[in-house]
Amino acid sequence: MSQFFQIHQDNPQKRLILQAVEILRQGGVIIYPTDCAYALGCCLENKKALDRIKQIRQLDDKHNFTLVCRDLSVISTYAKVDNQVYRLLKAHTPGAYTFILNATTEVPRRLLHPKRRTIGMRVPDNQIVLDLLDVLGEPIMSTSLILPGDDLPLTDPYDMRDTLQHQVDLIIDGGFCGMEATTVINLTGDVPELMREGAGDVAHFI
């Protein structure tokens, strides 16, 4: 049975943030709000938790997972970023974008696209997840909370509890945070490539 925390969107309760991070550190799978929609997350190095997320979403090994980061200072640890790419990232973070970047050796191989060795990276504009990341001290391995057969993410934390309370360890109710996925931009080539149009404005990339 999962725990259920109601956390304030603008002023997250420190006590609940600390408890949520402890659940992550103990190998838990959590549902948490972002600036676009709710997401499933776990610690970067936890293979069992990742396998549980794959099972919930029914994902194969070709799925592109995303590292959700506190700010740009940690991105260079996990992705290869030149000056031009860094300027693009700086101009559009935090925000509703996922950027596909060439991964460094710090990223566990099981999280990489098997052929391209790329990884999704993003810095969300949501205080709850930023506080989680600040305390955790590392990115959260993440994927959108879209259940098999659905086209859109779940939006109601009470529905999430009814559906997934036996499959996750924590559900964070952070209020309504949207139901549109991020805009995905591939920055591994010479020019930015729009992979998916979502909540983020694409005008600067097309």
Image (cartoon, helix red, strand yellow):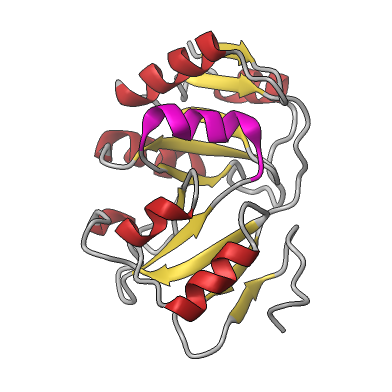
Q: Position of residue 123 (x, y in %)?
A: 55, 50
Q: Which residue is drawn at 32% across and 24% down?
A: 25
The range drawn in magenta is 125-137
Residue 65: quadrant of the picture: bottom left
Q: Where is residue 203 in the image (x, y as percent from the top left)?
A: 78, 76
Q: Would residue 53 appear left or right of 77 to someone viewing this image?
A: right
Q: Residue at x 46, y 32 (%)?
A: 134
- In the foreground, 9 or 164: 9
User: Chief secondary structure of the magenta span?
Assistant: helix
Q: Would residue 69 appear left or right of 199 to someone viewing this image?
A: left
Q: In this view, does 197 lie above or below 30?
A: below
- In the foreground, 165 or 21: 21
Q: Which residue is drawn at 40% across and 43% down?
A: 139
Question: Residue at the left extreme?
Answer: 105
Q: Is 47 part of what is drawn in magenta? A: no
Question: Residue at the bottom extreme?
Answer: 190
Instruction: Count all numbered tags in the image, as a single digit.
Output: 0
Q: Position of residue 23 (x, y in %)?
A: 39, 19
